[in-house]
Structures are given as structure tokens and as C-alpha cells.
Amino acid sequence: MKTLLIHLRSGSMMNMDSNLAVKLAKAALDKGHNVRIFGYGEGITPIKEGQEPKRFPNVGKELTELAERGATVVVCETCCAARGIHRGEEVKGSKIGSLTNDLSKFVLEADRIVTIAR
């Protein structure tokens, strides 16, 4: 089974990049691929629990749905700390992790890597 790594570096309310990441992940899951999403920099913001966007898709909710379908959703702990997001504040199915323990492993396991950033 092929594995896709999506390296997300854009925030949930900055533009539609996180929505694009969700759509790409859904398409890959639909085709039977493994999906890993790693948020870095502003790309950690979609996992923050309690967001209620009015004019944007609720990417946090969509990430929870992706995790329920088997996607792995992890964000950088250092990036979270810098933005005041702490363990326990992440949406269900996501995890606050690290570059060394998570991203490095995801890169080794991935058949394809897509970086979405501005």
C-alpha cells in the first residue's frame, strides 16, 4: 500500500491551503493509500480544538474525520508551544508530536511527499 505524506505549513485561516490538504488526503484515502499529515509552523493551527469558523471550512472537524478513516495527523510540538497550543487542546484523532520522532519517520515511510506552504 502506498503512503502519502502531506507536510502542511499554512494556517487554517490564512488561506485555503489546509482545505486543499484535507481534500488531497480524502482523495488518497479513497484510493486506498495510507495518509500522514504533519503540520509545521502555521500548519499546526488546524488541530486546535474549539475553532468555529463562519466563512471557512472547519478543517479541525475534517481532520478528525480523516483520522477516523485511518489518516495519521501530527503537528510539531515546538510550533504549538510557540503559538500557545498545548497538549489536550488538539482535535480528536490528532496528536502533538515532534520533528525527530514523527516527521522523520513519516518521511522514511512515504512513497510521495507533498508540501503545502506559502
Image (cartoon, helix red, strand yellow):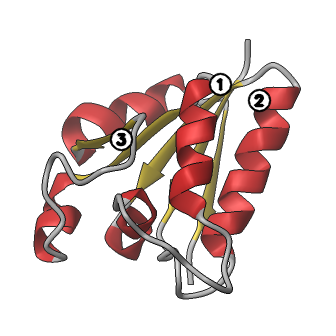
Kindly identify the residue that appears in the image at 81 percent across and 19 percent down: 32
Disc 2 versus disc 3: distance between alpha carbons? 19 Å
Q: Nearer the viewer, mark 1 or mark 2?
A: 1
Q: Dot 3, how many residues are within 10 Å of its Cα: few (below 14), some (14-19), or many (20+)?
A: many
Sequence-first disc among 1 and 2: 2
Vertically, is 111 above or below 7?
Answer: above
Vertically, is 45 above or below 2?
Answer: below
Disc 3 target residue: 103
Kindly identify the residue that appears in the image at 67 percent across and 70 percent down: 57
Q: Is residue 37 left or right of residue 1?
A: left
Disc 2 target residue: 29
Residue 105's tag is none
Q: Which of 113 and 79 is in front in this view?
A: 79
Q: Is mark 2 on a helix, strand or loop?
A: helix
Q: Is mark 1 on a helix, strand or loop?
A: loop
| Figure quadrant of the C terminus | bottom right
Disc 3 versus disc 1: distance between alpha carbons? 20 Å
Residue type at mark 3 is: Leu
Image spot of residue 18 (x, y percent): 61, 67
Vertically, is 109 above or below 15?
Answer: above
Sequence-first disc among 2 and 3: 2
Disc 1 target residue: 69
Kindly identify the residue that appears in the image at 62 percent across and 37 percent down: 66
Sequence-first disc among 3 and 1: 1
Q: Dot 2, how many residues are within 10 Å of its Cα: few (below 14), some (14-19), or many (20+)?
A: some
Q: What element carries label 3?
A: helix
Q: Nearer the viewer, residue 39 or 53?
A: 53
Residue type at mark 2 is: Leu
Q: Dot 1, how many residues are within 10 Å of its Cα: few (below 14), some (14-19), or many (20+)?
A: some
